[in-house]
Image: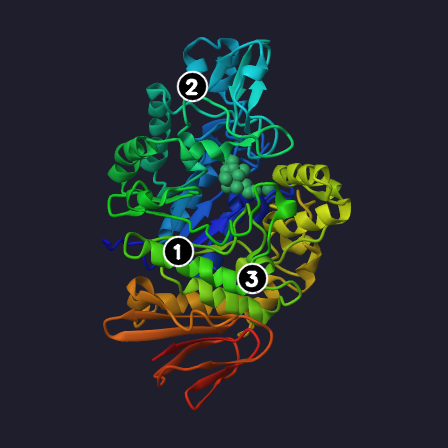
Amino acid sequence: MKKQWWNNKVAYQIYPKSFCDSNGDGIGDLQGIISKLDYLKDLGVDIIWLSPIYVSPLADQGYDIADYYNIDPRFGTMEDMDELLAKAHERGMKILMDLVVNHCSDEHEWFQKAIKDPEGEYGKFFYLEHTSDPSTLCNWRSYFGGPVWEKLPGHEDYYYLHVFHRKQPDLNWENPKLREEIYKMINWWLDKGLDGYRLDAIINIKKALPFKDYPVDRDDHLAACTLMLKDATGIGELLGEMRDRCFKPHNAFTVGEVFNEKDEELADFIGDNGYFSTMFDFSETIFGQSDQGWQDNVDIKPDDYKACVFATQKRIGDIGFLSNIIENHDEPRGVSRYIKEGDQSETSKKMLATVYFLLKGLPWIYQGQEIGMENLKISSIDEVDDISSIDSYKVALEAGTSKEEALHMIEKYGRDNARTPFQWNRTKHAGFTTGTPWLRVNPNYVDINLESQKDDEHSVFSHYRKLTRLRKSEKYSDTFTYGELIPYMEDMHNVMAYYRKSQNQTILVIANYQDEEQTVPFPSTIKEVLLNNYEDCVIEDGKIALKGYQAVVFEL
Ligand code: TEU
Ligand code: CA
């Protein structure tokens, strides 16, 4: 693997709408982000990814873009964006935007022109089918529920494809004119000084054509649209072209949101001449997901989490450099998901932070994760904003789940969990806004907030700060970045431990992934304790006695 400038960095995802509101309209914005750059710098962040801030009707919270060249006024202006780029660069930080090009908004001018003239130039920017009989259309189910085909507004005999929401028509990547428009737009931003992109839902840009039915997999008589991804070959040509036309000439950093990749394609995706710099490891994210809906999901246990993570580490080997997360804006909070219900504490949160942060790969922090933000309790479906939760609720009820269970299911898996406003302090609305927040603040902000953790050496926040410093320290950076990862005591129940080894250093990360104490064989003598979420640890007769959720990092 060729070494890259970003290998030893720390990345951070901002969900702008919920980060910091500078003008009291209840919506986070660019000036809010600018005001927190020093905070992020101090935390140890080098690379910032912004979820979409382009002009958008916000049907899917900005993942439905109506104008790729402008900032939505709710988030600010282009001057604010230029200021953010300049101020981030002054601080040695990089800014990534979200590249959402599988689809645009139905309010984008391309789609509006397609409506006016389906057989014209812009009709070919989309997947339009000319038929008066919708039963002839293929039977795919969209990610957010219901058929992927929707009637083209104002027409009785045209349908358009949308694998996500109906307000997100899919762009036709087979059309070279569309591709040119996309490359032009990407290059426009990169020329402006943007440092790179996170590539949204990118695997979906290649459709298996011609459209055909797949075996029905639910009572709605539809088939998951992901089924077609297995048959969609040739995505490499599209991604390779985009790399060569846009990312490579700008030396841009890119991180792919890739699900359903094929094993043999890993090197093509993130090898030395890969389509992207890196991509997210979602193996633990998708663990236990049922094809039938959230109601049938299986919870992930510590041993499963460990198995997922280690399997990925083995699979990736030296092929490339993955990106490691415990949460993002589409997922529940990591501490609520990967720690047993009821066991969430400062100690267990620090344990989870330690074991994922020191893996091989680029560590990402999602806003609020660094203070241990947790999932949100809900009492009624009316409180839910997320379109995917609302659909999953419907599916669950139809499958016979009770309302109460279905709500609990949203509490566990819903996307709002990650989208509640950042908890800055104990004042009203957690200091996120002086107005009314667009989404309710998690009531636990009185206990969980940055202000109360900032100067407390033992807080979750301070632990994250220690982790970024340790990972990037002159002495250990090379081992944490490039050192081999070798699992230790891999089969021991509720223990997660691994070595990071370089030529002249051996580091051991060892964690007791349960509330009960546990004694674990200890391999050798210690040079130094680099990090510990307890005051001390007891090593005797070749064994280490670990307290509940204790995690220790040693140099051996
Ligand atoms: O998500 C892609 C994706 O595959 C989603 O269906 C994801 O599995 C789902 O959100 C989980 O509930 C990306 C974005 O991250 C997401 O926010 C967008 O809604 C989606 O693309 C469409 O742009
Ligand atoms: Ca605002």
Give the farthest residue toward the bottom.
541
Residue 53 visible, this orientation: no
**Pointer 3 residue:** 301
At label 1, counting other C-alpha atoms closer than 10 Å, the crowd grade (few under 14, some 14-19, many 20 or more) is: some
Question: What amino acid is found at the position of numbered circle 2 in the picture?
Answer: Phe
Q: Nearer the viewer, residue 494 or 96?
A: 494
Q: Judge: label 1 CB < 8 Å from ligand 1.
A: no
**Pointer 1 residue:** 312
Answer above or below: position of 179 versus 474: above
Where residue 352 appears, as percent x and y from the top left, is 51, 65
Query: Could you say which quadrant of the image residue 16 lies in?
Result: top right
Q: Nearer the viewer, residue 431 or 279?
A: 279
**Pointer 2 residue:** 125
Of helix, strand and loop, which one carries label 2?
helix
Residue at figure coordinates x 53%, y 10% from the top left: 131
Which quarter of the rendering shows the C terminus? bottom left
Of helix, strand and loop, which one carries label 1?
helix
Answer above or below: position of 194 versus 525: above
Residue at figure coordinates x 50%, y 56% from the top left: 326
Where residue 369 appears, as percent x and y from the top left, is 54, 58
Query: Could you say which quadrant of the image residue 334 lies in?
Result: bottom right
Answer above or below: position of 346 versus 248: below
Question: What amino acid is found at the position of numbered circle 1 in the picture?
Answer: Thr
Q: Nearer the viewer, residue 216 or 462?
A: 216
* Dots 2, 3 in contact, CB < 8 A: no
**Of the two numbered discs 2 and 3 in the rendering, the one whose residue sits closer to the viewer:** 3
Where residue 526 appears, as percent x and y from the top left, is 36, 84
